[in-house]
Image (tube, rainbow, N blue to C red):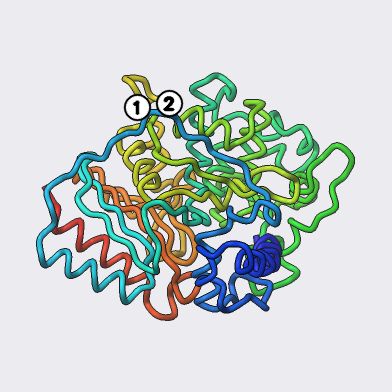
Amino acid sequence: MRKLLIGLGLLIGIGLIIWAAIGPDWRRFAKNINTEPDVLFWTQAERNAGFRMLDHLPMIVDNRTIAAGDKVRELPEGEPLSVGMKAEIDRYISENNVASVVILQNGKLRHEQYGLEFGPKGRWTSFSVAKSFTSTLVGAAIKDGHIKSLDDKVSDYIPGLKGSAYDDVNIRQILTMSSGVRWIEDYSDPTSDVALFNVQEPEDGLSSLVTYMRKLPRAHPAGEVWNYSSGETNMIGVLVREATGKDLATYLSEKVWVPYGMEAKGTWLLSPDGEEISGCCIQAATRDFARFGQFVLEDGVINGQSVVPDGWFADATSVLYETKYDGQGYGYQWWPNGDGTFEAMGIFGQGIFIDPANQLVIASNGNWTTATGQKDGERGERTAFYQSVRKALAK
């Protein structure tokens, strides 16, 4: 992931110069041109510009469209929030570099608000929120009969992995990041796996990703240890493409975006292999991120039929493995909180929070001062904000 972000940083820096010259609507976001080729070290102003315009640079960064349909799922107005709750949202947005907040309850729009000169017509990048979309496509592929079972071996669907440590790994184990295959995700170490896999030279007939992943050794027995691995999430995307014969953007459009009624097209950035980065980088309107949360809350049911197998989201959002992060668990690329709520999360403040007990969805995007939001307390502030809204809107 780090090399991907480095590449994006360099390319978007060039792109900002281009848009400053030919796109007056974007000129105010390009005053400080990026000189550091790693998004993790962009200035606040550079990220503020870049996060809203990654897919506006098709000549620089390739992406694939997630097509929307003609029929939009309306978000009827719900009861307005209290004056005190609105004041709390004002404070939260202004103090935590928040670009957008959309709150749904019972499928109704309780509140919508924007910051950082962003608005409802714009698309903000998701970072790892995309992981939860990708895992949902696995469920859809099972329902459609493209994948037989989560107990199937990964190498049965990705032939390039045969003869590797992944011969012992099933689909459930890569969904839960419990493959036991060694992976080091250290963004500060240029020799770690996350820094090297995107610059791997592909072997004949294989993608660079599969070429890299098939060489990794086993560290633990499969299914015993949770270890965060962006490489494996990207491999889930390969699995879905191999199983369905469709690219991820097309399949997401067919299964969710069009039938559920997303209001605007989305985009998905592509890897050096020319395929969607399944662990990152969906661009969408915040209302559509909220609609996806509502789709999950409704168990993936569209027109009376579920897109995923019965019980899929109950399993996907359960604590299947404990993690080292703030007491959160891990499911199928979702972060359950142990109190019945769960989240999709991405660096720099992207998120979808879902509370089934209160039929509540909160979609938010932002530009935290650091990737994890730990330094200035933004992550803790977001957790407190979610809980404050949850308490105020409790049934």
Decide: is 93 above or below 107: below
Alpha carbon distance from label 1 to label 2: 6 Å
Quadrant containing the N terminus is bottom right
Of all residues, the one furthest to the right in this rendering is 204
User: Which numbered disc flags the more N-terminal residue, 1 or 2?
Assistant: 1
Residue where numbered disc 1 is placed: 301
Residue 62: image x %, image y %?
Answer: 68, 49
Q: Tell me the kind of residue under disc 1.
A: Val
Write down the residue under mark 2. 307
Residue name at image x 51 percent, y 50 percent: 283
Q: Which kind of residue does numbered mark 2 sit on?
A: Val
**Relative height, residue 178 to residue 137 (above, below):** below
Q: 99 above or below 222?
A: below
The count of marks equals 2
Instruction: Label 2, secondary structure: give it.
Output: loop
**Disc 1 vs disc 2: Cβ atoms closer than 8 Å?**
yes
What is the x, y in percent for residue 132? 47, 45
